[in-house]
Amino acid sequence: ADSMQLLRECVRVVKSYGFEIINADITILCEKPKITPHKEAMRKNVAEALALAQNFVNIKATTMEKMGFIGTGEGFGAIATASIRYFDWSKGEPKLY
């Protein structure tokens, strides 16, 4: 499956419930390859899918110090967190959740 298409669908669902994404923090777990050469392109693509400015998306990486299937190079992992805002129009101003 195309992960960017899945991300765009998640954004659509979040918005359909009256929320908007205000920032995202993503940690990639892998031994190789190093993401530094690709980091800015990744930020650009994720920011575009989330309909955010690039400075509201953070991407970083860490290794698993040779532990587990990620540490042995058999796989990758990711941890992603997003802050969202709900607009409570009855009170006239947004609330952060």
Image (tube, grey):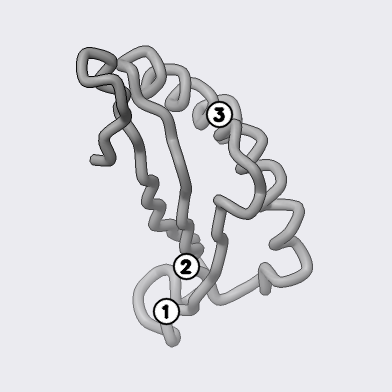
User: Residue drawn 35% across and 74% down?
Assistant: 68
Q: CA distance from mark 2 to mark 3?
A: 20 Å
Q: Earlier in the sequence, mark 2 or mark 1?
A: 2
Kindly indicate whether the residue at mark 1 contacts the one at mark 2 (C-beta within 8 angstroms).
yes
Q: Secondary structure at mark 2?
A: strand
- Quadrant assignment, res 46: top right
Q: Pointer 2: what residue?
A: 29
Q: Earlier in the sequence, mark 3 or mark 1?
A: 3
Q: Quadrant of the N terminus?
A: top right
83 above or below 10?
A: below
Which percent across, then down, holds residue 26? 48, 57
User: Residue drawn 54% across and 25% down?
Assistant: 8
**Residue lying farthest to the bottom in this orientation:** 65
User: Residue drawn 42% across and 29% down?
Assistant: 20
User: Could you tell me the amino acid type at mark 3?
Assistant: Ala
Judge whether residue 86 can be spotted in this image: yes
Q: Earlier in the sequence, mark 2 or mark 3?
A: 3
83 above or below 77?
A: above
- Quadrant assignment, res 14: top left
Q: Which mark, by number, is residue 1?
A: 3
Q: Pointer 1: what residue?
A: 64
